[in-house]
């Protein structure tokens, strides 16, 4: 009888513990689901939060490392030629994102497929297309001796040409004044920045001053598009850091010098501190820097041009 009472007590305690664990598990899953929904599902294609910005940054860092290793396995050098031949793919992302905004405005309810054409999912979509084109170009180079870089550039240019046709003749460019304003700010700031970069390169010895100018020009384009869209048109900033800086200084024009100095510092760090054995990683990182400036900058320019 005593044994039965002990068993009942043990079973009671075990049942209580299991019950508490189940409740805690459901509570945790509910809180986790709410956390993921608030920070990753709800903002998708609309805005960014500090949490998802940090997570996306970590994902990007891992992706840069994996891509550099993968290119090394394929025997493809991440040099200037690869970066220049990848330009159409960056612009494909910008054009695709702008067209998606034209078809499905961010304020409306989105069909499920449109979520693949907003940031950051569109980066994975474009990466998949880029990877297929890269492997096909590599195959043609090894089998029929076609130029790898020319083939890679051409495959991207084909799709980009079609998207430009859709933007120009289907969606239509309605706000040429906005485009010209962005081009004016980006052009003038680049003309000011370029001599400074060349002068600094004589001291720091950039590996490629031309590529450095292109990367900084891309980010100046992004800053110019943000400045024009926010200060002259009824657009809002999606990223928390630029929003904080604009509120701190009280003007959007401050993004131009801040972006210039930040990207210049990163390029100096890459070219000055990383040795020749890390050139593969440096090349992929520079390609990522170029993408992070050119892709959103051109997307904002196209959105403004289409009055989306």
Image: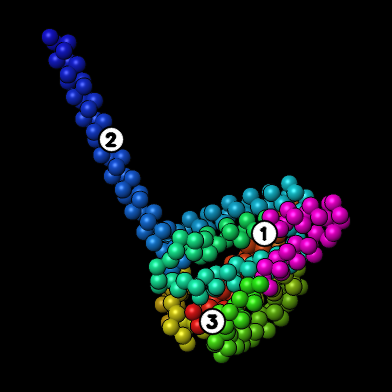
The first of marks 2 and 3 along the sequence is 2
Numbered badge on residue 247: none
| Location of mark 1 (residue) | 130
Q: Position of residue 34 (x, y in %)?
A: 33, 53
Q: CA distance from mark 3 to mark 1?
A: 26 Å
- Inspect the magenta stretch and tell me whether residue 155 lies in it: yes
Magenta stretch in the rendered image: 132-161
Q: Local crowd at mark 3 within 10 Å, few (<14), some, or many (≥20)?
A: many
Q: Residue furthest right?
A: 145
Rendered position, 183 above or below 282 = below
For residue 157, which quarter of the picture? bottom right
- Are the residues tagged 3 and 1 within 8 Å (C-beta)? no
**Nearer the observer, 103 or 236:** 103
**Nearer the observer, 198 or 146:** 146
Rendered position, 281 above or below 104 = above
Rendered position, 29 above or below 247 = above
Q: CA distance from mark 2 to mark 3?
A: 55 Å
The first of marks 1 and 2 along the sequence is 2
| Location of mark 3 (residue) | 306
- The residue located at (39%, 54%) in the rendering is 36
- The residue located at (69%, 49%) in the rendering is 70
Q: Position of residue 53 (x, y in %)?
A: 47, 61
Residue 293 visible in the picture: no
**For the residue labelled by badge 1, is the local secondary structure a helix, a strand or a loop?**
helix
Mark 1 or mark 2, which is nearer to you?
1
| Location of mark 2 (residue) | 21
């Amino acid at each position: 009888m005593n044994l039965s009472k002990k068993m009942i007590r043990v079973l009671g305690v075990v049942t209580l513990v299991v019950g508490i664990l189940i409740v805690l598990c459901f509570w945790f899953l509910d809180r986790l689901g709410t956390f993921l929904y608030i920070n990753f599902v709800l903002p998708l294609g609309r805005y960014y939060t500090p949490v998802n910005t940090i997570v996306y940054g970590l994902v990007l860092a891992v992706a840069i490392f994996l891509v550099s290793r993968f290119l090394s396995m394929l025997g493809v050098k991440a040099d200037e030629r690869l970066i220049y031949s990848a330009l159409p793919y960056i612009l494909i992302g910008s054009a695709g994102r702008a067209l998606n905004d034209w078809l499905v405005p961010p304020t409306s309810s989105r069909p499920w497929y449109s979520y693949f054409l907003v940031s950051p999912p569109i980066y994975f979509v474009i990466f998949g297309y880029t990877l297929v084109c890269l492997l096909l170009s590599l195959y043609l180079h090894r089998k029929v001796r076609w130029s790898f870089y020319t083939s890679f550039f051409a495959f991207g240019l084909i799709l980009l040409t079609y998207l430009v046709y859709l933007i120009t003749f289907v969606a239509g460019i309605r706000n040429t004044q906005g485009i010209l304003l962005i081009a004016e700010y980006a052009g003038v700031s680049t003309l000011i920045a370029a001599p400074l970069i060349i002068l600094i390169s004589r001291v720091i010895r950039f590996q490629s001053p031309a590529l450095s100018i292109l990367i900084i020009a891309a980010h100046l384009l992004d800053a110019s598009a943000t400045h024009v869209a926010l200060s002259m048109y009824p657009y809002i900033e999606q990223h928390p850091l630029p929003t904080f800086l604009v509120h701190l200084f009280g003007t959007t024009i401050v993004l131009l010098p801040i972006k210039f100095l930040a990207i210049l510092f990163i390029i100096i760090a890459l070219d000055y501190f990383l040795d020749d054995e890390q050139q593969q990683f440096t090349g992929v990182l520079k390609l990522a820097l170029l993408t992070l400036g050119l892709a959103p900058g051109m997307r904002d320019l196209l959105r403004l041009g289409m009055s989306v």
